Image (cartoon, rainbow, N blue to C red):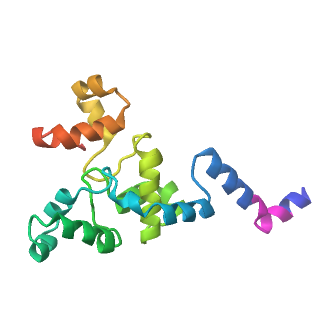
Amino acid sequence: MKLLKTLFSVGVIPVIAISFLSKLYGVPSATAQTQQIAQSESIIFDPYVFDAKYYMSLYQDLREEFGRNNLSAATTHWKKYGLQESRQGHPAFNAKYYLEKYPDLAANFGTVNRAAYIRGINHWLTYGIRECRQGSANFDPSYYLANNPDVARVYGKSNCKGAIDHWIKYGIKEGRRGTP
């Protein structure tokens, strides 16, 4: 028992526990996360993370600076500044919102810098969509499926990726609510 207390007091047990829980719940270690970041800058342009038309339509300052239809400038702005400024690049996902909504992710990834946001994006794409986590204040896939039985019938009642696809392609235009 004394050995156990000593190991706990010097931080050995918490490190082992965190490592075990990270593996159990699919959260990569800090080293693996850093490697993923280095290899995955391109994930910021995933179609479930960034839509240049949406991005441009959302921000008046960008339209004034670049013009309404300059999607190339919108994409460049997103890469250089948008993510760090906590701007939203897609109607169903906002990295800052996602990390703030889920304390388990914020505790593991942080919440206020590009690396944390990229880790959050990686989690969203790898696990979050499949787990039906809410990626933005605009859209909750569980709510959408529960309140649109026709969508649940077509895509499946737990197919959150299908719910996002439907909402983006049809639901917004049809005036369907993405959240309560």
Residue with the most extreme top position: 153
Where residue 149 sits in the image (x, y, percent)? Answer: 25, 25
Foreground of the two, 147 or 33: 33
**Residue at horizontal 38 percent and vertical 30 percent from the top:** 158
In this rendering, position of residue 80 left or right of residue 27: left
The image quadrant where one finds the C terminus is top left
Q: Main secondary structure of the magenta part?
A: helix
Magenta region: 6-13
> As displayed, is residue 138 above or below residue 77?
above
The image quadrant where one finds the N terminus is bottom right
Residue with the most extreme right position: 2
Quarter of the view holding residue 30 = bottom right
Residue with the most extreme bottom position: 65
Where residue 78 sits in the image (x, y, percent)? Answer: 28, 68
Where residue 82 sits in the image (x, y, percent)? Answer: 29, 70
> As displayed, is residue 141 above or below residue 69?
above
Where residue 101 sits in the image (x, y, percent)? Answer: 40, 55
> As displayed, is residue 46 above or below residue 158?
below
Q: Is residue 177 visible?
A: no
Magenta segment includes 12: yes
**Residue at horizontal 53 percent and vertical 60 percent from the top:** 36
